[in-house]
């Protein structure tokens, strides 16, 4: 199959809400400590939205920054693809709210759901549209208000999650940040390891679902933890092999930020120095599909990669779902 046009990330932006929730704040709310959270997850603090703020609000700021960075007008966007597990509502899509708020009057708009791997999925979709020539400019967004689906009485999950958004503009190749390959995977047999049980067609909202706290994330942490490490190693190894790159020659791994111990264990198994993974989980926690575009924005602002460097994006999450993208910076 022909590969079509080259495809680049031509702009990037992110937005984090101002309000900080520290480990010490959490230790006043329930039975936990800064020491436990730091040691077991690497997280020190996370950002949380104020009441009344939705995923599209975070997405709009991130999107406008990405469009400005790409020097693209909202009216030039052909498609908005948003990855989120915390949409403004079940329907219409969060992408439609973003479309209206940024004034992307010529854009199609839809959301996709692949949990923490969602940004890589959305990037892969955008690459396909642009590589085929079907579209010129796709806005890819990862936006999450995880605090709205987090059970702050459950100490094993509430310490993990934070809110935020990131966005990238995907267009035909300009010689920078070229998306060389993407790969996606899933295993629905393990859906129950990480899910939000109620509020869909299987278990619609009722007094019982509210009383049983079934509108919050349920996570079987230990099982997800083990799989995440194995998967990250496998996905990075395959992505490198597919591109005839030696793993040791990869300049940076940009992983979904789920737990510092997952990232460090995977780096050790890949025989890469842990400094070669980009990490900001200490500041933002797990922001699901927003974590990778936020990381890309920070990497660009801090100029941590130079033209020609190779980076691999890698993510794993509920579904189970996973994916990677090899980017030539
Ligand atoms: O985004 C992708 C998907 N998500 C993930 O990748 C998350 C993956 N999982 C994890 O990151 C980890 O499994 C957690 C951070 C969720 C939990 O860490 P763990 O090392 O697997 O701890 P655990 O669940 O085995 O619990 C160990 C102990 C338990 O006490 P006992 O039974 O040994 O007495 C827990 O009750 O730690 C206790 N515990 C806590 N203690 C203080 C659990 N949460 C807390 C807490 N503070 N917040």
Image: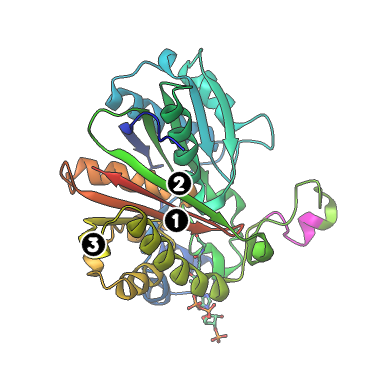
Vertical position of residue 115 compared to residue 156: above or below: above
Q: Which residues are magenta?
A: 209-215
CB within 8 Å, label 3 to label 1: no
* Secondary structure beneath label 3: helix
* Secondary structure beneath label 2: helix
Vertical position of residue 246 compared to residue 221: above or below: above
| Position in image of residue 280 (x %, y %) | 32, 56
**Residue farthest toward the front in the current orientation of the protein:** 1
Residue 191's label in the rendered image is: none
Find disc 3 in the rendering and name its residue: 276
Find disc 1 in the rendering and name its residue: 315
CB within 8 Å, label 3 to label 2: no
Say which label, 3 or 2, has the lower sequence index. 2
Is 217 part of what is drawn in magenta? no
CB within 8 Å, label 1 to label 2: yes
Say which label, 3 or 1, has the lower sequence index. 3
Residue depicted at 47% across the width and 44% down the height: 119
């Amino acid at each position: 199959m022909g590969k079509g046009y080259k495809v680049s990330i031509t702009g990037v932006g992110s937005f984090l809400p101002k309000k900080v929730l520290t480990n010490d704040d959490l230790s006043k709310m329930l039975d936990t400590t800064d020491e436990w959270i730091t040691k077991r997850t690497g997280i020190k603090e996370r950002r949380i939205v104020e009441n009344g703020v939705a995923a599209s609000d975070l997405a709009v700021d991130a999107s406008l920054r990405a469009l400005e960075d790409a020097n693209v007008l909202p009216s030039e966007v052909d498609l908005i693809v948003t990855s989120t597990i915390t949409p403004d509502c079940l329907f219409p899509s969060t992408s439609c709210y973003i479309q209206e708020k940024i004034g992307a009057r010529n854009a199609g708009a839809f959301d996709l759901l692949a949990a923490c791997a969602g940004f890589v999925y959305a990037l892969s979709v955008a690459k396909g549209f642009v590589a085929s020539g079907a579209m010129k400019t796709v806005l890819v967004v990862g936006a999450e208000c995880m605090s709205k689906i987090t059970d702050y009485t459950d100490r094993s999950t509430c310490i993990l999650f934070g809110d935020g958004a990131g966005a990238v503009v995907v267009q035909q190749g300009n010689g920078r940040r070229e998306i060389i390959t993407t790969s996606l995977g899933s295993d629905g047999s393990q859906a129950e390891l990480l899910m939000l049980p109620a509020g869909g067609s299987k278990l619609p909202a009722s007094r019982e679902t509210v009383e049983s706290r079934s509108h919050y994330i349920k996570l079987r942490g230990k099982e997800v933890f083990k799989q995440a490490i194995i998967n990250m190693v496998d996905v990075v190894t395959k992505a490198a092999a597919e591109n005839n790159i030696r793993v040791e020659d990869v300049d940076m791994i940009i992983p979904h930020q789920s737990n510092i111990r997952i990232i460090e264990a995977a780096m050790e198994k890949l025989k890469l120095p842990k400094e070669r993974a980009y990490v900001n989980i200490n500041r933002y926690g797990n922001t699901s599909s927003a974590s990778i575009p936020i990381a890309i924005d920070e990497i660009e602002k801090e100029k941590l990669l130079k033209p020609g460097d190779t980076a691999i994006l890698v993510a794993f999450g509920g579904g189970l779902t996973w994916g990677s993208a090899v980017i030539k910076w």
